[in-house]
């Protein structure tokens, strides 16, 4: 869809917005191993500047909160981890999906045994969620999908499947970036502002949908079909936009407006 002029201008007015950011592929380039990911200092500085100026900023990621805090250190922001299964509000209040931890431990053990049969398929345990990474062995994509699908079929009462870039995640049922954005927008200091969500992956489409329904601005990083309204080319473009945003310079030329809204 074509962006109308008012929405285009609002994308450049941080004092009227509340910002939500994915991390991997959005604030940080994707690396061969999740442990190698880092947020470039210029992006951290821009986020800190927005936060210091009283502009609400939150990060929403498939990573656990502890990892997000490590990547953002020394900045500590409101955040949602594991696609919203755990959340820290602006006032520091914590919320986490109620799950059977004993069952999660059993699933982790079974997944570890199953992944061991496919060298190159890496299991990442997040305690209450699991990720099957095959970036280092792209040929294992079908095996990863089949394995993840099998576990969701067996444990569908607790887990749901979330495809991503070279990864299949098993996340707690009900965890959604869209729902967690809605939860933030019901609270201070986000309430009453225009939500802006920036993400890059299939996992972010629920967030784009929620922001669109709330009358906000959704921004897709990179290529691929999306329901987002705007597009930034890559992480470097996100960094440039943020820097110009906090210094009040024009940002519109960095965006590529979506001419046609596509649905997944």
Image (tube, helix red, strand yellow):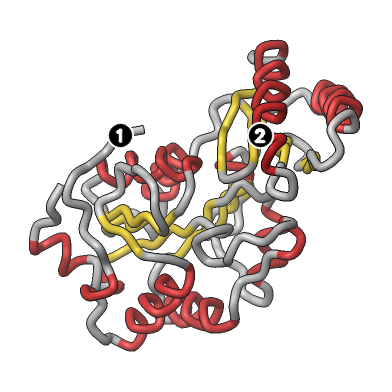
Q: Nearer the viewer, mark 1 or mark 2?
A: 2
Relative to 198, say whether 163 is above or below: above
x and y percentages locating residue 142 in the rendered image:
65, 28
Q: Which residue is mark 1?
A: 263
**Residue drawn at (67%, 42%) of the image:** 138
x and y percentages locating residue 133 in the rendered image:
71, 42
Mark 1: give few (<14), some (14-19) or many (20+) Cα within 10 Å. few
Relative to 15, say whether 66 is above or below: above
- Toward which corner of the image does residue 32 lie, by quadrant? bottom right
x and y percentages locating residue 249 in the rendered image:
26, 86
Q: Which residue is mark 2?
A: 141
The reply, left or right, for residue 32 in relation to residue 207 is right
Q: CA distance from mark 1 to mark 2?
A: 23 Å
Q: Secondary structure at mark 2?
A: helix
Q: Earlier in the sequence, mark 1 or mark 2?
A: 2
**Residue drawn at (50%, 41%) of the image:** 203
- Toward which corner of the image does residue 245 lie, by quadrant? bottom left
The reply, left or right, for residue 61 in relation to residue 227 is right
Q: Can you see residue 42?
A: yes
The reply, left or right, for residue 232 in relation to residue 123 is left
Residue at the outermost front position: 139
Residue at the outermost left position: 5
**Residue drawn at (72%, 11%) of the image:** 154
x and y percentages locating residue 251 in the rendered image:
26, 77
């Amino acid at each position: 869809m074509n962006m109308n002029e008012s929405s285009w201008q609002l994308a450049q007015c941080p004092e009227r917005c509340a910002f939500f950011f994915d991390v991997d592929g959005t604030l940080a380039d994707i690396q061969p191993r999740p442990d190698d990911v880092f947020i470039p200092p210029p992006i951290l500085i821009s986020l800190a500047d927005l936060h210091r100026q009283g502009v609400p900023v939150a990060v929403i990621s498939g990573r656990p909160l502890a990892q997000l805090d490590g990547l953002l250190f020394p900045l500590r922001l409101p955040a949602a981890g594991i696609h919203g299964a755990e959340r820290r509000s602006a006032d520091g209040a914590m919320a986490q999906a109620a799950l059977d931890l004993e069952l999660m431990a059993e699933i982790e053990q079974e997944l570890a045994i199953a992944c061991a049969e496919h060298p190159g398929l890496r299991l990442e345990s997040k305690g209450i969620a699991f990720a099957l990474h095959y970036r280092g062995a792209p040929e294992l994509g079908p095996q990863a999908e089949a394995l993840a699908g099998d576990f969701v079929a067996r444990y569908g009462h607790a887990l749901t499947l979330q495809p991503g870039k070279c990864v299949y995640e098993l996340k707690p049922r009900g965890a959604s970036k869209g729902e967690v954005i809605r939860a933030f927008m019901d609270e201070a200091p986000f309430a009453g502002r225009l939500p802006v969500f920036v993400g890059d992956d299939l996992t972010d489409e629920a967030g784009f949908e929620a922001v669109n329904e709330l009358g906000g601005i959704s921004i897709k990083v990179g290529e691929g079909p999306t329901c987002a309204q705007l597009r930034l080319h890559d992480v470097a473009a996100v960094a440039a936009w943020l820097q110009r945003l906090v210094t009040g310079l024009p940002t519109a030329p960095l965006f590529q407006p979506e001419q046609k809204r596509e649905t997944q």
